[in-house]
Image (spheres, rainbow, N blue to C red):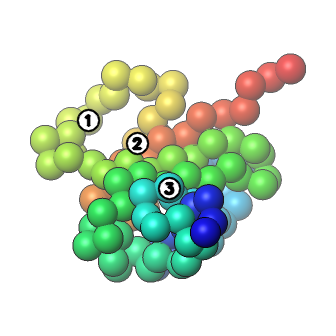
Amino acid sequence: MGMFDYVRPAEPVECPSCGLDLFMFQTKDGGRDLRVIPESTLSQQGIRSFYELCPGCHGWIEFTADPPQARACTGSLMPERLVCREREPIPGYAMSFRAPEKP
């Protein structure tokens, strides 16, 4: 048994800080058997969140299932974390970004 599964987006997700394309994310919402879950099956498989550390800038990128009432909201309770975009990189999931802490 593995510790997580992988999520593969249909298109690469661009890091909002450095612009690096990310092709794979991790999730603990699945069976944790190191399988690859395509974006098209996320909701059917009950995946609520997935995440990755950007290897380019070391920022933390996380996607969480976006409740319908939150999609209409234009603001954020945590503006320093949430990256607002005109288009959702992965429909139905809100993306947040946390820059690495400075030493």
- For residue 12, say whether it is visible: no
Q: Depth check: give the residue in front, 14 or 2.
A: 2
Q: What residue type is labelled 2?
A: Cys
The residue that mark 1 highlights is 74
Q: Do the residues labelled 2 and 1 touch (CB within 8 Å)?
A: yes
- Counting residues from the start of the chain, the first of labels 2 and 3 encountered is 3
* Secondary structure under the numbered disc 2 in the rendered image: loop
In percent of the image, x 29 and y 29: which residue is there?
75
In percent of the image, x 62 and y 53: which residue is there?
52
Distance between the Cα atoms at labels 3 and 1?
Answer: 28 Å
Residue 71, position in %: x, y? 21, 46
Residue 86, position in %: x, y? 35, 53
| Disc number for residue 84 | 2
Tell me where residue 4 sits by quadrant: bottom right
- Above or below, 15 against 90 in this view is above
Q: What residue type is labelled 3?
A: Lys
Residue 19, position in %: x, y? 67, 57
Q: Which amino acid does label 1 sit on?
A: Thr
In percent of the image, x 72 and y 32: which residue is there?
100
- Counting residues from the start of the chain, the first of labels 3 and 1 encountered is 3
Residue 79, position in %: x, y? 43, 25
- Counting residues from the start of the chain, the first of labels 2 and 1 encountered is 1
The residue that mark 3 highlights is 28
| Disc number for residue 33 | none
The crowding category of the residue bearing disc 2, from other C-alpha atoms within 10 Å (few below 14, some 14 to 19, many at least 20), is some
34 left or right of 81 in image: right
- For residue 3, say whether it is visible: yes
- In the rendered picture of this protein, how many numbered marks are placed on residues? 3
The crowding category of the residue bearing disc 3, from other C-alpha atoms within 10 Å (few below 14, some 14 to 19, many at least 20), is some
* Secondary structure under the numbered disc 3 in the rendered image: loop
